[in-house]
Image: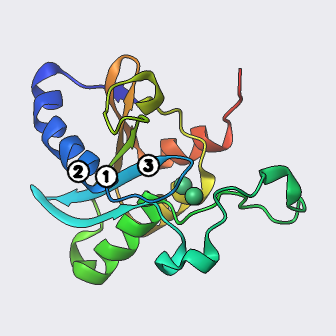
Amino acid sequence: MHYLSKEQEQEMKTWMDEAARVAKQATCTRARCGSVIVSDGQVIGSGFNSPPGDDEGQRRCVVPKDTYDKKVTDKTCCVHAEQRAVMSALRNRPDRVAGSIMYFIRLDGEGNVRASSSLHKPYCTICSKMVLDAGIAQFVLMQEEGLCSYETGEYNKISFSYANS
Ligand SMILES: [Zn+2]
Ligand SMILES: [Zn+2]
């Protein structure tokens, strides 16, 4: 994992702004997130979180997570922004997914970035596995110290070793 230089950060900020723009379409009531996947300076996939198929009948945002059996390993309510971005990139540009970069942002309650609620420690193993398996090379997200880039193999390992402390 490495934090980015000011120059790299400036370039990547463009894509984070794009991810934030996508996040504004999110309808999940727990968190509004956006992702874009970039290959050779071009967005090849994007996604925001909302119920599966955008079907209101599938909305689970208000269901408490402790009501599910432990066999239900994914207790999150909506389809994640990263999952949507991977699916769209594989549909749009399957030839360009390998080696691409995933940008992820979570908006605060007012729809802004860079507030503390936008900071993100990796823990979603569904997305970390999917991003790695798709062949995406880097995962960029916002942390206290600034924009942060992970190699996706490392991102998967740290997601599995997440500890709430
Ligand atoms: Zn939700
Ligand atoms: Zn996820």
Figure check: 95 above or below 42:
below
Tell me how far mark 2 sits from mark 3, CA to CA. Answer: 11 Å
Tell me how far mark 1 sits from mark 2, CA to CA. Answer: 6 Å
Q: Residue at x 35, y 65 (%)?
A: 85
Of the numbered discs 3 and 1, the one sitting upstream in the chain is: 1
Q: Are marks 2 and 3 in contact (CB under 8 Å)?
A: no
Q: Residue at x 23, y 42 (%)?
A: 16
The N terminus - image quarter: top left
Q: Which residue is mark 2?
A: 21
Q: Residue at x 14, y 20 (%)?
A: 6
Figure check: 28 above or below 5:
below
Residue 24 has which mark?
A: 1
Quadrant for ligand 1? bottom right
**Label 2: few (<14), some or many (≥20) within 10 Å?**
many
Q: Amino acid at mark 2?
A: Arg
Q: Are marks 1 and 2 in contact (CB under 8 Å)?
A: yes
Q: Are marks 3 and 1 in contact (CB under 8 Å)?
A: yes
